[in-house]
Amino acid sequence: MTDTHTLPTDSAVELVDELCLRYRNWGRWGADDQRGTLNFITPSVLAHAATLVQTGKVVSCALPFNSDGPQAGGFGGRTNPVHSMLQDGGDIALGAQDHLDILRYCDDAVSMPLQCGTQWDALAHIFYRGQMYNGHGLEKVTSTGATVNSIDKIADGVVGRGVFLDMARHHGVPWLDPGHSISGGDLAACAQRQGVQIRSGDIVLIRTGQMAQVRSEGTWGEYDSGPAPGLGVDSAHWFSDNEIAALATDTWGAEVLPNDTPGVFQPLHLILLVNAGMTIGEIFDLEELGNVCEQDGRYEFFFTAPPLPITGAVGSPVNPLAIF
């Protein structure tokens, strides 16, 4: 394992470039593939996942989509959702719908960046040296959206066996401190401690406890793109070697911040999302799931989290469900 904290910038860039090429899956599932590692969720993998539904208990891993969300405009001008009513009880009372026979209705709308809350990154979300997954260039994403690797291409893809790795409890703390880097060895040790076997095609959810910290302190603080615990660049080996289909964490950007690769921002997004083709989820609320898994002593479940099939979108809000 490389100690990335001691790497100079040039060596960090060289390491990330090397890992991008080592774990590149471009062409592995064909030149036209737009699903990446979700291809690991084969029919037999999915059929096995379905057998994990035993008690019928359902846990949502989504934050509420409202104006009290985590976005403070710290990255890319992202804002929290704005929910508005198009027709409400007042309109009905004032007679705005009196032209209708008997029936009255309420309608509403929402305006939001697609990456402002619990969400999946599409494979078109990130570029590495001018290319996204499977070698497509910048011209494939225009002002009207992405023509390849958009989120709608995996509308039926993010469903299978979910595995929960509670890194905070593994370390015996309510939450990991900002800057705590999670290595591949940490992930393996946590899985072993919890008694859960990792399989090809798993969707892995990783709890740092940052949501618990936010709630304990009563403020989002620097959650929006500030210092955070998260996945270190070394974890790329574990995700790739285990043929993980998708990963998600409870932090803003999944990776440790500041990143442990000087001169490279969000290296795992380059290595895993762009080159390996691995779908990445962020801002998942994993607190209730952590409590349920600890109480039941069970860290695997049927997991379903299909993105909204928004044509050309490079991300999507989602309501992930863990079903026991």
Image (cartoon, helix red, strand yellow):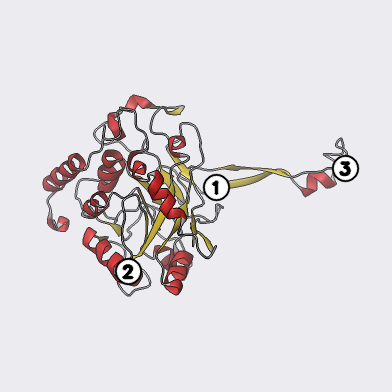
- Circle 3 SS class: loop
Residue 278 is situated, as x and y percent measured from the top left of the image, at 33, 44
- Circle 1 SS class: loop
| Cα–Cα gap, marks 3 and 1 | 33 Å
Mark whose residue sits in front, 1 or 2:
2
User: In the rendered structure, which amino acid carries the disc numbered 1?
Assistant: Pro
Residue 260 is situated, as x and y percent measured from the top left of the image, at 22, 54
User: In the rendered structure, which amino acid carries the disc numbered 3?
Assistant: Ile
Residue 78 shown left or right of residue 140 in the figure: right
**Mark 3 lies on residue:** 102
**Mark 2 lies on residue:** 195
**Mark 1 lies on residue:** 81
Which quarter shows the N terminus? bottom left
x 41%, y 72%: residue: 297
x 51%, y 37%: residue: 309
Mark 2 or 3, nearer chain start: 3
